[in-house]
Amino acid sequence: MTTGHRTDRGQAGAEMWSLGILVFVVGTLICVWGASFIATRADADAIASHYIRVYSEGRDIQTARAEAITAAQSVASARGVSWSRVTVSVSGAFGRCVPVDVAVSIRLNGLALPGISGLTASDVKVSRREFTDPYRALYVDSPDQPATLCDEGS
């Protein structure tokens, strides 16, 4: 019987296994961070949507801000987002048919991976724009309110 010469062809050494495991672990962490980013963006969008809806329907600016913050906090709580990670900023005047912008930012915790700097802590920002209650003319108590674009139908 003849025995063939044995070679190490087709064998993976320990360095190949360790490299494969490292790539698998790092790839998994990057996928988890990406999924976390997408979920945080969805949370920020839901908070911004509810905030701007309640704010734009408010009777006056103080009531609108208070009710909008309450609505945003309840949405954040329902989605499991800590309110301490959320920042809300509003720009634009408060009045009938005036565009208002709201920006919601949620702090996303980063991953500490050696050699990868792009996965550090960052803010996920979402902004929305809406007109402050364009149908307010239907229930304004005072008929001497100044006309707006909404009243003129433009």
Image (tube, rainbow, N blue to C red):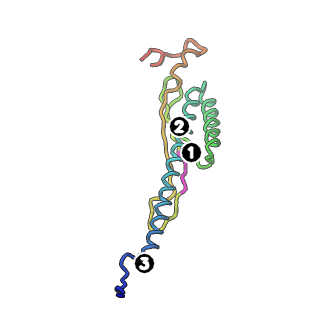
For the residue labelled by badge 2, is the local secondary structure a helix, a strand or a loop?
strand
Q: Amino acid at mark 2?
A: Val
Q: Could you classify mark 1 by the number of other residues whose Cα lies within 10 Å: few (under 14), some (14-19), or many (20 or more)? A: some
Q: Which residue, given by chain and number where applicable, does mark 3 sit on?
A: 13
**Closer to us: 23 or 49:** 23
Image location (x, y in percent) of residue 39: 53, 47
Q: Is residue 44 left or right of residue 14?
A: right
Mark drawn on residue 48: none
Q: CA distance from mark 2 to mark 1?
A: 10 Å
Q: Amino acid at mark 1?
A: Thr
Q: Which residue, given by chain and number where applicable, does mark 2 sit on?
A: 90
Q: Tell me which residue sits at (37%, 84%) in the image.
A: 6
- Mark 3 vs mark 2: which is more N-terminal? 3
Image location (x, y in percent) of residue 71: 62, 35
Image location (x, y in percent) of residue 87: 56, 45
Q: Quadrant of residue 145?
A: top right
Numbered range of the magenta stretch: 105-109
Q: Quadrant of residue 74?
A: top right
Q: CA distance from mark 1 to mark 3?
A: 51 Å
